[in-house]
Amino acid sequence: MRIGVLTGGGDCPGLNAVIRAVVRKGVATYGHEFVGFRDGWKGPLEGLSKPLGIPEVRGILPRGGTILGSSRTNPFKIENGVERIKENLAGQGVDALIAIGGEDTLGVATKLHELGVNVVGVPKTIDNDLGATDYTFGFDTAVNIAMEAIDRLHTTAESHHRTLVVEVMGRHAGWIALHAGLAGGANVILLPERKFDVDQVAGYVEKRFQHQYAPIVVVAEGAQPLDGQMVLHNQELDAFGHVRLGGIGQWLAEQLEAKTGKEARTVVLGHIQRGGTPTAFDRVLATRLGLQAIDAAHEGDWGKMVAMQSTDIVRVPLAEATRELKTVPIERYDEAEVFFGS
Ligand code: F6P
């Protein structure tokens, strides 16, 4: 069989580990051939491909990013997009696709499968918010990067008696904020799942100063204060059609400074959370998902997404993956609240 592989959406540490596992087992165990499609769905849409064999996947296990490139191109938003993909797959003699991506990429994979394209999906997002899988690779790496930043910020915040607000990624779900905040000993954690009261946050900050320690506030980029406490920050689409978030950290630091009279600074971790080498956990998870994906393709088990459930790697219908976003359960947030302000 000739199998196309693509990576779509925001990049994520571990993508190369998936590609490597797919190709290594696909060639060595099953004797399949591979084509690497460039830049997500843009590759099959425009016929942009590159060779993908054992030599191309040597040495890529620890490398962040993706050797195939990525984009947020959606063929369903482009005229004749689906027909063009089908033509290009046929033109390159490609029988099936392994699509590695998040909600948008897998949403496209689901629809293409319904239209007769042979697809297997592999879940990816540092946000850890995809349904049907307990963990996505890239999340553990992002949490570790954010935790290290928080560790460092404690000492400088304490030296200067300042509040430090750390803005982490997470548009719709606060998994990174919750885990990095707990692991880094943050004094307040704010998530998109629960609107916060800025006066209550100021209260936690003051309490922390009373204990002679400087507060660290971790805020997810998609967190919002209670209605009426703030004019929504910029959520407009940029020139590339991406939603630009960010700004909540800066706004919050200004509010906390005004309300507590203590200097406050903001650190926006941004794309540093997505860059660099994956942790051991993410390398192993990505590898296991890749191995299961090539097994599914070899068996012709199309329309499936590979997933981690408990410690097992299983297959679920692709449609299930994108049905519901996995947000932080409120009990998990309540659990963390005991540390706020103390
Ligand atoms: O979904 C992954 C993610 O990193 C989000 O946490 C973040 O909001 C978004 O992608 C940023 O996307 P971009 O790289 O397009 O700015």
Image (cartoon, grey):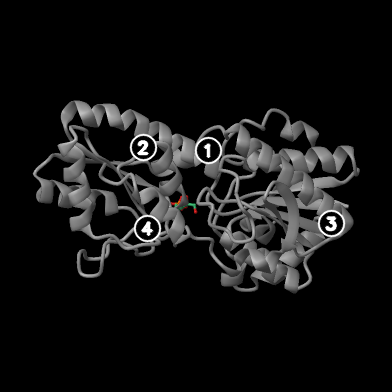
Label 4 residue SS: loop
Tag 3: amino acid: Gly
Tell me the distance, in whole angstroms, between the alpha carbons under discs 1 and 2. 18 Å
Q: Residues within 10 Å of mark 4 (few under 14, many from 20)?
A: many
Left or right? Give the position of 61 relative to 225: right
Cβ of mark 4 under 8 A from ligand 1:
yes
Residues under numbered marks 4 and 2 in contact, where contact means CB atoms less than 8 Å apart: no
- Is residue 57 positioned above or below 102 on the image? above
Q: Closer to the observer: label 1 or label 3? A: 1
The residue identified by callout 3 is 93
Q: What's the mark number on residue 185?
A: 2
Task: Identify the residue position indicated by label 4 in the image.
Answer: 222
- Quick one: 257 or 86, which is closer to the camera? 257
> Which numbered disc, 1 or 2, marks the residue that appears first in the sequence?
1
* Nearest to N terminus: mark 4 or mark 2: 2
Q: Position of residue 99 (x, y in %)?
A: 69, 55
Question: What mark, if any, has residue 141 been given in the picture?
Answer: 1
Q: Amino acid at mark 4?
A: Gly
Nearest to viewer (mark 4 / mark 2): 2
Q: Closer to the N terminus: mark 2 or mark 3?
A: 3
Q: Earlier in the sequence, mark 4 or mark 1?
A: 1
CB within 8 Å, label 4 to label 1 = no
Tell me the distance, in whole angstroms, between the alpha carbons under discs 1 and 3. 37 Å
Give SS at disc 1: helix
